[in-house]
């Protein structure tokens, strides 16, 4: 369990440029996307929602209240996608930001490895 005092990723930093890029690209997808089923009058980009929800669920590894179990699990799971992680919490923070940005990509929405890592982190 993550303590209430621990800051979340979204409170500290968020990869807005990358998520915005994925959100803009997602609006132009015309095949296989739920938005093609109906003309929604106030559709929100799924990429931005997916990334923000993940950032709100994950703790900031540089926060002193961040559980060691989370850091250990993140160091175990993230290399499956992003390669080696350095020994410092700042390097882990950067890899988490990269994962959140990549997770916003519609192409990875059903990718089994990304889903496994996302579920494992949450």
Image: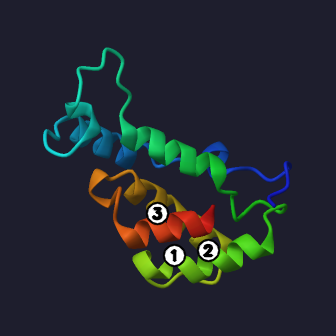
For disc 3, the marked residue is: 99
For disc 1, the marked residue is: 78
Point out residue 54 in the picture as x, y percentages from the top left corner.
55, 51
Element assignment for label 3: helix
Q: Quadrant of the N terminus?
A: bottom right
Identify the residue at image location x=61%, y=66%. 121
Alpha-carbon span between mark 1 and mark 2: 6 Å
Taking depth in this image into account, of 47 and 10 the one nearest to the observer is 47
View extreme (left): residue: 30
View extreme (front): residue: 37
Determine the image quadrant of residue 113.
bottom left
Residue 118 falls left or right of residue 90: left
Residue 79 falls left or right of residue 2: left
Identify the residue at image location x=46%, y=45%. 50
For disc 2, the marked residue is: 74
Identify the residue at image location x=49%, y=70%. 116
Residues packed near mark 1 inside 10 Å, few (<14), some (14 to 19) or many (20 plus):
many
Point out residue 112 in the picture as x, y percentages from the top left corner.
38, 70
Which label belongs to residue 69? none
Q: Which colour scheme is used?
A: rainbow
View extreme (top): residue: 41
Taking depth in this image into account, of 55 and 16 the one nearest to the observer is 55
Residue 107 at least partly seen: yes
């Amino acid at each position: 369990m993550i303590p209430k005092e621990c800051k979340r990723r979204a409170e500290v930093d968020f990869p807005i440029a990358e998520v915005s890029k994925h959100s803009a690209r997602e609006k132009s997808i015309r095949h296989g996307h739920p938005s093609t089923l109906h003309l929604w009058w106030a559709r929100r980009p799924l990429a931005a929602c997916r990334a923000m929800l993940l950032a709100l669920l994950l703790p900031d590894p540089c926060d002193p209240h961040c559980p060691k179990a989370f850091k250990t699990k993140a160091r175990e799971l993230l290399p499956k996608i992003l390669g080696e992680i350095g020994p410092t919490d700042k390097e882990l923070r950067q890899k988490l930001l990269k994962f959140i940005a990549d997770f916003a990509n519609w192409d990875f929405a059903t990718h089994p490895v990304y889903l496994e890592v996302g579920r494992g982190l949450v």
